[in-house]
Image (spheres, rainbow, N blue to C red):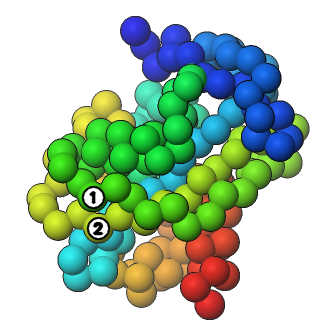
Amino acid sequence: MSSADEILDVVDEDDRVVGQARRGDVYARGLRHRCVFVWARDPEGRVFVHRRTATKLAFPSLYDMFVGGVVGAGESYDDAALREAEEELGVSGLPRPEHLFTFLYDDGAGRTWWSAVYEVRCAGPVAPQVEEVDWYGFLTPEELEGRLRGGEWDFTPDGLEAYARLRALRG
């Protein structure tokens, strides 16, 4: 099954399930759905940053400071966060990511999705999926800030909003 055929819950403005649809249809029709963002850090506190592959349905070839993705039909945010983190990092046995906050992302063009933000520590080596990740590295918070200020890397817009909210939360 291709990722476009994956079945997602369609939700309302209060995050209540109102139906289901194929992922490709959800994206094409701008249906509200659920996503998870996982802030993955190594034992030294460095952040996992990656560039998405050109074949991704959403935001191809852009950088992201979160791993994550869509929540499948009937799946909980917590389960999706662990699944996505392990899949994208290419590891197993991660601790369950800690939920930090949830917000309704609005892309400004009429498309919105509920976004649950988590954090996890990844102690071991990573082996990201080549279908998902073109490049990756662990950056210090200062290196990440430099990339953001420098503007030479284009980051996913929903990841930028999640990051801004995370920074505001942590002061």
User: Residue 110, percent across and down?
Assistant: 87, 38
Task: Tell me how far mark 2 sits from mark 1, CA to CA.
Answer: 7 Å
Residue 41 is drawn in which quadrant?
bottom left
Callout 1 amino acid: Pro
Secondary structure, mark 1, is loop
Q: Give the left or right position of residue 118, taking residue 24 as reference.
A: left
Q: Residue at x 56, y 16 (%)?
A: 7
Quarter placement of the N terminus: top left
Q: Residue at x 77, y 35 (%)?
A: 16
Question: Which residue position is annotated with label 2?
Answer: 121
Q: Nearer the viewer, residue 26 or 15?
A: 15
Q: Give the left or right position of residue 21, taking residue 126 as reference.
A: right
As displayed, is residue 48 above or below residue 45? Answer: above
Q: Give the left or right position of residue 27, taking residue 85 as reference.
A: right
Q: Give the left or right position of residue 162, taking residue 129 as reference.
A: right
Q: Nearer the viewer, residue 151 or 42?
A: 42
> Is residue 49 visible to us here?
no
Q: Are marks 2 and 1 in contact (CB under 8 Å)?
A: yes
Quarter placement of the C terminus: bottom right
Question: Which residue position is annotated with label 1?
Answer: 95
Q: Nearer the viewer, residue 16 or 113?
A: 16
As displayed, is residue 23 above or below residue 113? Answer: above
User: Residue 60, percent across and down?
Assistant: 51, 38
